């Protein structure tokens, strides 16, 4: 059995409109390189014609293999399934919607091949076709994460990257349920290098992200990598208690010395509402962490594989092993 030099992992969910175009473009890039490769598609429970197209691609192209997950698990799980089962000496993760240009792949490979760089990630020079809200929220998020997280996340990078075998093996040991991939990539470390590119618009089809998902995604990022929000409650509580103490002294002083009436209802209302609000908010933050502990403690698999259509080489190897085992 020969190990391919390169495994390209492609998570794919309802991409019938782009799949064939993607396959054409990536093949025209990879066939020009002098290395062996496999295209490992991970079908993440698509409900359209994607699976049929994959089957068709596999019969036409011996480099194609695919994993079919039992349902939609989300992109992070799909990427994980691909990484876990990719055989190559290096792995490239790329989106199927052609927002990550396959033409960049030779540039990703070069630092790995020439200098043994373990992680070569593509960094967007521009974000074509994205609203300013998305741009500002993204930039805000990176700033916050950079300040409070344990490792700095490279800005403007997605999952599009090349990883060497040893960094992949390291990544495979991180089995948390809430998979904030950018954080996991950064956590692993190893020599890294960036390659700049211009991010294209989606070729066809629709993004699977909406603002609610993005919000949850940032929550995963923050709660998965830092417990800083938990400390906020301590500090805020301390500050409020100090103010309350000073206010209390002032009221006692005014009543005893000046004999002034303390105006009641409005100030009491404000204090009660303020404290009630902050308490609820921090209970919510606590809840985020507790919920995550709950999910992790169940220790469920990250994804379930329904079929694994291996490349021909691997299939032959499996058949040979089956014969050996019977004997
Ligand atoms: N994707 C997936 N599972 C999902 C959602 C998306 O495998 O539940 C794949 C999708 O097919 C594409 C990639 O992940 O190849 C990126 O998805 P999308 O373009 O929707 O994300 P965006 O580029 O907007 O971040
Ligand atoms: Mg996209």
Image (cartoon, grey):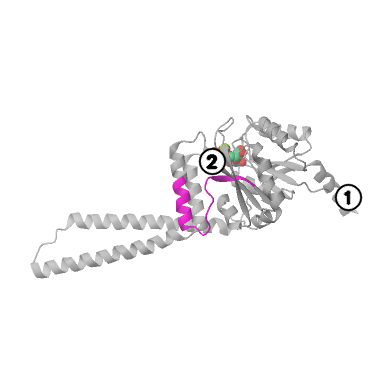
Which of the 4 image quarters holds residue 35?
top right
Which of the 4 image quarters holds residue 205?
top right
Q: Is residue 251 visible?
A: yes
Return the x and y of residue 213 as percentages of the image width and height. Answer: 50, 43
> Which mark, by number, is residue 125?
2
Q: Residue at x 58, y 57 (%)?
A: 187
Return the x and y of residue 257 as percentages of the image width and height. Answer: 10, 70
> Which mark, by number, is residue 15?
none
Judged from this view, the residue extending furthest toward the front is 114
Q: Is residue 208 visible?
A: no
Which of the 4 image quarters holds residue 239?
bottom left
Q: On the image, numbered disc 1 is attached to which residue?
A: 323
Residue 209 within the segment the image draws in magenta: no
Q: Residue at x 18, y 56 (%)?
A: 265
Q: Nearer the viewer, residue 29 or 183?
A: 29
Q: Residue at x 67, y 49 (%)?
A: 111
Return the x and y of residue 148 as percentages of the image width and height. Answer: 46, 58
Q: Nearer the viewer, mark 1 or mark 2?
A: 2
Q: Residue at x 45, y 53 (%)?
A: 144
User: Which badge, 1 or 2, comes first in the chain's sequence?
Assistant: 2
In what quadrant does ligand 1 lie?
Answer: top right
Give the quarter of the figure containing the C terminus: bottom right
Secondary structure beneath disc 2? Answer: strand
Q: Are marks 1 and 2 in contact (CB under 8 Å)?
A: no
Judged from this view, the residue extending furthest toward the left is 259
Q: Nearer the viewer, residue 157 or 273?
A: 157
Residues under labels 1 and 2: Cα distance? 52 Å
Q: Residues within 10 Å of mark 2 (few under 14, many from 20)?
A: few
Judged from this view, the residue extending furthest toward the right is 327
Q: Is residue 75 left or right of residue 289?
A: right
Question: Start and end of the magenta stretch?
Answer: 139-161
């Amino acid at each position: 059995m020969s190990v391919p030099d390169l495994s390209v992992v492609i998570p794919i969910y309802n991409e019938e409109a782009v799949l064939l175009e993607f396959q054409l473009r990536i093949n025209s890039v990879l066939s020009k390189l002098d290395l062996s490769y496999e295209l490992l598609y991970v079908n993440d429970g698509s409900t359209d014609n994607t699976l049929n197209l994959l089957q068709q691609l596999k019969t036409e192209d011996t480099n194609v293999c695919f994993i079919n997950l039992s349902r939609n698990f989300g992109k992070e799980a799909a990427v994980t399934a691909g990484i876990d089962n990719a055989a190559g000496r290096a792995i490239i993760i790329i989106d199927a919607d052609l927002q990550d240009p396959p033409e960049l792949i030779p540039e990703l490979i070069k630092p790995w091949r020439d200098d043994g760089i373990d992680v070569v990630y593509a960094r967007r020079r521009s974000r074509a076709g994205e609203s300013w809200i998305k741009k500002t929220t993204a930039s805000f998020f990176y700033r916050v994460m950079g300040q409070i997280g344990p490792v700095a996340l490279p800005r403007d990078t997605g999952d599009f990257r090349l990883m060497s075998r040893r960094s992949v093996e390291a990544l495979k040991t991180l089995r948390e349920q809430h998979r904030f991939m950018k954080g996991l990539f950064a956590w692993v470390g190893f020599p890294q290098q960036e390659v700049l590119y211009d991010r294209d618009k989606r070729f066809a089809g629709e993004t699977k992200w909406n603002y609610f998902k993005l919000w949850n995604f940032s929550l995963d990022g923050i709660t998965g990598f830092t417990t800083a929000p938990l400390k906020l409650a301590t500090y805020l509580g301390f500050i409020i208690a100090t103010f309350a103490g000073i206010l209390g002294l002032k009221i006692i002083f005014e009543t005893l010395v000046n004999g002034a009436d303390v105006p009641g209802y409005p100030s009491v209302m404000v204090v009660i509402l303020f404290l009630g609000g902050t308490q609820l908010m921090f209970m919510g933050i606590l809840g985020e962490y507790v919920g995550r502990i709950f999910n992790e403690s169940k220790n469920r698999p990250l994804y379930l594989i329904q079929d694994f259509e291996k490349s021909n080489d691997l299939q032959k190897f499996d058949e040979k092993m089956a014969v050996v085992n019977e004997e």
